Structures are given as C-alpha cells and as structure tokens.
Image: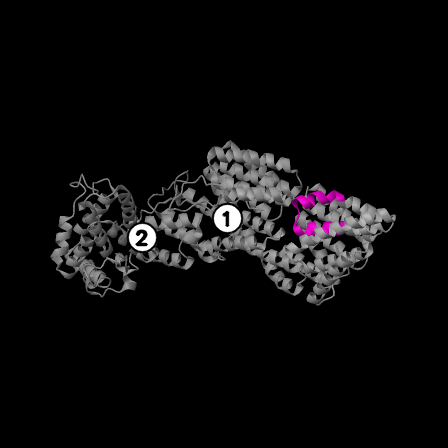
Amino acid sequence: MASVHESLYFNPMMTNGVVHANVFGIKDWVTPYKISVLALLYEMTTSKPIALQERRRLNKLILFVCLSGMLPSNSICCETPVSDACCLLSSHTLSLNRLHEMADGELKDMEYFFATLPTPFSAIDSEAYKTSVVGLFMRHMLLAYNKLSFSQVYKLYKALQQYYHSHYSQPGDVQVGLPALAADDSDMDLTSTEDNVGERMEKEELDTAPLHESELSRGPLSQKQAEYFLARQAYLLKNDENKALKPSALQDELNNMLKFNPDFAEAHYLSYLNSMRVQDIFISTHSLLHYFDRLILSGSEGKSNGDEGYGRSLRYAALNLAALHCRFGHYQQADLALQEAIRIAQESNDHVCLQHCLSWLYTLEQMKGSDSSVLTEDSVKMAAHFCLPYLVSLGIQSLVQQGAVQGKTAHELMDALKDTDILHWKHSLSELIDISLAQTTSIWRMYGKSTMAQQQAQLLLNMNSLEQVNFGVQQNNTEAFAVALCHLAELHAEQGLYGAVSEVLKHLKEQFPPHTQHAKLWMLCDLKIQFDRAMNDGKYHLAEPHVTAIAALNKTEGLYRKAQVLKALNRTTEAYSILQRLQLYCEKTKYTEMIIRVMLVTAELHWESSGFATALPLLLQALALARQHHLQALASETILHLAFTQLMLGVPEQALGVLHEAMEPILAHGAVMDKGRALLLAARCQMAMAGTRSNGQKHAALGLAVQSLGEAAAYFSMLDCKERLRDVHYLQARLHHTLGQTPQRNKCAMLFRLLDQELQAPGAAVAMRL
C-alpha cells in the first residue's frame, strides 16, 4: 500500500519552484559563446521582417540560447538551436562573417563590434528594446564588457580566436552551428579591481596561462548560472529524475560551486537531495547539516528565536534530520532528533513546526509497528485547527490505511477518502490527489476488487496534474505512480497478459532507475511475477533463486516464498518450521493478509500427509479472519481449499455447494489461475457426484464436468501451465472413455502423453492437488 508521508520532507530551498541563490558576487561575464549569440542577435535586430510563424520559432530559439548562457557549458549543447536560428535568417552568413572578421582580424575589430551594438535604450523599435529578453541580454553583456580591464579584454580576444578556429575552417561554413564550448566558463572575475597589487599579479599570471579546457570548464559560476542551474535540477529531481543530471555528474557540479563558495547553503541542500537518490547516508547527513549551518550564518537570518532567525532553522534542521533517519530505518536516532525538534518548537511557540513533528511522530510509531491511531486523530484535529490542509489530508490518509489493516468496511474507507478528495481539489493539492488515488487502488486490490483497482490506477496515470509545468516536465516520478504501475503489472500478470506486463515493467525501469528511492517497488513486483510464473509452470529450480532476491527486498515475502518452494520440493518439515515462525511474526505485527496465506499453505502441508481433517479447523479459522477483514480474494481462495478438503473427505455435495459460493467473485475478479482451479475442482465434484446417480443423471453430470474441464483448460492455456493442463487432459480422457466417446478420448490421451513426456517428471497425484 502506498506510503502517505513521502511529501512531509521540509524543503526550505524551494519557493514556487525557484531556488533562492543570491550569495554569488559575480553577476555576469562575456565569453566567446555569448559573443556568438550577440552576433546572432545583432543580425536579428537589423534583418528584414520575416513571416510570423518563423518569427515565433526564432523567438523560442533565441530564448533558449539566452538561457543556455546561464547554464554550465558541460551540461548543455546549443549547436542545433543556434544553427537553426541562423538558417531562419535571410542573412544568416553575416553573423558567421562577423565572427570571422573579429577572429582573423585585430583586437580593434572586437572593440568596434561592441561599439556598434544597439543599446536597449536607443533600439526602441527593434527586438532589443530595454524590457525584452534580447535587450536585457545585450545590456548585461555591454556592462560586463565595459568593466573588463585591458588584460581581460586581451584574454577574451584570444579565447574568441581559439573558439572560432577550432570549429570553423571557412567564414561561410554554416552547417556546424555555434556550439557552447568549455570557453563559456572562462575564469574572468568581473567584480574584482586592480587596486590591490597581489590581485593584479594574480590576474597577469592568469592572462599568460594556457587555456586548458578542463580548467576553463571548472570556473566559478555567475549568480544567474547558479540560480538557473539549481532551480532546474531541484525541479527535475522532484518531478522527473531521469531528466536531471546523473548523481555523480550533479555532485561534481555542486562540489565545483562549493569550492568557490563553501557558504552557498542552497548547493548543500541540493547535495543532500542528490545523496538521497543513491541512499548515501553519510553525504546526505553531512550536506543537510551544512545547509542549516550556512543558513544560520547567512545575512538573511536574524538572531531571534521567533518565527524568523536561527531558531526556526534549528528546529527545522532537527525535523529534517529525523525524517532522514526515519527514511533509512534508524528509528532510535529519528526519535531523538524528533524530540529535539519538538523541544525547540515548543520554546519558540511554533505551532506549524509542532504539527509537522506530530505527523512524523505517528509515522515513526507506524514504522515501529505500534498502534498510532490516537496520535493520528490528534494530529488531524490540531492541523484542522491551525488551517493546515496538507497535514489534515495526510493524517486522514494514514487513518484510512490503518482502518484497512484493522478490517473496516470499504464504504467507511471510501467515505473518508471522498472527504480528503474534496479537500485536495479545494486547495489544489495535486500531489495528495495522486496519493489518494494510489491509496484507493491499493485498498480495492486488497479487498479483491481487481476491476475497481485497475480503474483507479488508470485514472491516476491519465490524470493531468494541477501543478504548473516548468522546464517542460510534469510530475510523474512519485511513489504514487510507482505503486499504480506495479498494481497494473500484477493485475495483468494475473490475467496471463505477460506482454503487457513486460511493457509496464520496462516503463517502470526507465522512469525509476535502480538507484532511485522507489525502484525497490518495481524490483519486488518483477521478482514476485517471475516467481509465480515459474511456480505455475512447475519450474521450481527457476523459482528458487528468486527467493533470495525477494527476501533482500521484503523479508516477510521472502520467507513465505521459501516455504512455498520447500513444499513443492516435498521438504515438508522445513516448510512447516518456516511457516510457524512466519505466522508468529505476522500475528505480532498484525499482518492479516500474510497470516491467512500462511494458514492456507499450512493446510496444503496437511494434505500431503492425508491430514484433511486436521486441515479443516485451520481453514475455517482462515475463512473467519478473511471475512472479518473483508478480504474477498483471500476468502474465495480459502473456500476453494475448504471445498477441496470436503471432496477428499468424501462429501462432494457439500463441497460443490461451498464452491458455488466462491465461484461468482472468482470469475468476476479472480486471477486466471484461480478461475482454472475453481472450474477444475467443480468438475471433480461433479464427477464424484455422478457415481451415485442413475444412468440418465450420470450422463448429464458427466457432461457438465466435461464442459467445466474445457473451460479450465482454456484458462490454464492462457498461463501455459503445463502441469495443470496435464491433469485436465487426464480427467478429460477418463470422462470421454466413460461416455464412450472414443475419438475425444484418444485426442485427450495423446495430449496428456505429450505433456507428460515434455515435463519429464512425475507430477503430484491429481487427487492430492487443488
């Protein structure tokens, strides 16, 4: 079931998707790439008018190249956009010719170029007016160029020559475009002066140093570069991690920022988020603490302990540290950090922080396996009192989750979710809408309503987000999407649609790479599907290796699957021992679904020793538990086991009557395997009852049994379950022989023989298997 507290992590860096990074003194500087952009803009402002459609396309390209100058050069590539923009202009060769004149001419040619640029104040009727993007870009470049000393101008000119000659052999070569090279990040300090002798000597040494690409690409970033880079990466990490930089590359960029400015607090916070991607507890803790240390020391923080100042930073630092330890399973450390945050928040009378602490407190109690319903209800009431709809919704979602585990009816839970949905739409809480739909999908799946679960999952995947779309990316990498897709994969696998399962898992692997936080969801889903498929095919040697991998992701599921494999391999004693330990653990943690599954497998172990009477009380207990918690799928499976037990005890009439109770929900919502098993069991009951009837009634009962076996064979064929098909063909051959239908008998006997030879292993007796 989806976790509903994933979004409680406090993110003080983000405000409407904008990162506040104002600690850099470097405003902007001129680079060879920006000179090439200026040449393009100059031709655009002086060219003849072009068609409206081409103008719109050109404006988009110009906006891109202007913003690209704010990014580190090794994270962008602007070759195609600039080349496309040049091709749109009627005089596209003029911009390249102008670069050729400067690069192959003298320094005065570059001086003349900047002197002839239209200023934003004089170019009122052109695209370079003062409030336009083009005008602001030109204005910044002119101011930055005018601040350069002679040595810096000379260095810029040499960099321009190197930039041009390394990419253009002829002045009219237009098929290459204007790439953004490492020279974009040249080490020009525009804010320093030459009043200090030491600084002047350092500048002269830099001027005479060779221009190595590795050195130029690791220079300090301007304020705009830092703001744009951090805002983009933080947004991508939150909404579509695949489009963000790789963890190692992003960490290198952040280390480069911190090398030139160690007190850049927002870079530390992005480093914390990046470390969380790869589950690095050391770097994430280190970066988080450094973020709040720098935030306290920055000039924007006051020295009061009220709502503003370092007191607020300290309590939220402790709260974030508690969330960090909670995510890594360090519950004791999380509890200590949470108590510290509560203490500081109480001293400061910060009710909002206290409500966040209370939310994490009941979340921590849930992770420990304790009953936190009282704490959750108190949190919902207090959050509603302080008008915190986000925390109110999270609290109600947690109560719904606990209610589902405790066995409350579906209509009670859906009414509560309906109230939260009204709250979500009223306050436009898009992320919580996704969580609510994922929660609803999980609840319907737990109750055995596969059709409703699939509908809710599709609704989530096809719903448009209410959040503003920035950088062309929508939010689709949250836990809610992962949970919905995993449910869809399992539902398709239950119906034997393994082609669709492969497509869903492929998308999951692309959207949630192995290093991401929610990757373990699809990993476990994939392993469970492979395990079930191998067990259905009777290939236990293929299922056994999956047990270790499943146990690494989920210990409880791993033990349960191990017991299943041991039972299939006739290692009854070992399987029984594991099941007993697993049942005790699940009773302690109140994992009702697993308790029922363990009881069913234990009953199957009793069947192996012909202890059908011993299995009967266990199955009745499992059925009562399933009905108490409204688990229809498990209740139907338990009824199948009960009917089989009654059949083996010699009462087929009662077995068939019990089976009819479960037939409708199984055929409506059950897996293909359960449908086949139910029809096969019904046919065997009909065969057993036919032996005690007269000839006319006997032939009618056997005819119904033949029809049921045919339907069962169709379901087993969908899963390619050869062992079950072998059992069906064996029974069909016997029935046709009794009815005197020789051709049909011979056909079924041939199919049985072919499958028996293919399996090359004696299967369990038909009478001993459900």
Quadrant of residue 748 in the image? bottom right
- Residue with the mark numbered 2: 71
Taking the image as shown, residue 304 lies to the left or right of residue 188, namely right
The quadrant of the rendering that contains the C terminus is: bottom right
Residue 740, horizontal then vertical, whole percent: 81, 56
Mark 1 falls on what kind of element? helix
For the stretch drawn in magenta, what is the main secondary structure? helix
Q: Residues within 10 Å of mark 1 (few under 14, many from 20)?
A: many
Q: Residues within 10 Å of mark 2 (few under 14, many from 20)?
A: many
Which amino acid is tagged 1? Answer: Ala
Nearest the eye: 227 or 749: 749
Residue 574 in view, yes or no: no
Residue 244, horizontal then vertical, whole percent: 40, 53
* Farthest front residue in view: 743
| For discs 1 and 2, the disc positioned in front in the rendered view | 2
Which amino acid is tagged 2? Answer: Leu
Color theme of the render: one colour
- The reply to whether the magenta stretch includes residue 677 is yes
Q: Which mark is residue 241?
A: none
Residue 558 in view, yes or no: yes
Say above or below: 344 vs 564. Answer: above
Of the numbered discs 1 and 2, the one sitting upstream in the chain is 2
Nearest the eye: 690 or 596: 690
Magenta segment boundaries in residue numbering: 660-682
- The reply to whether the magenta stretch includes residue 92 is no
Real-space CA distance between mark 1 and mark 2, rounded to the nearest whole angstrom: 32 Å
Nearest the eye: 647 or 143: 647
Residue 537, horizontal then vertical, whole percent: 66, 60
Residue 562, horizontal then vertical, whole percent: 67, 60
Q: Which mark is residue 323?
A: 1
Q: What residue is at 53 percent from the left and 44 percent from the top?
A: 5
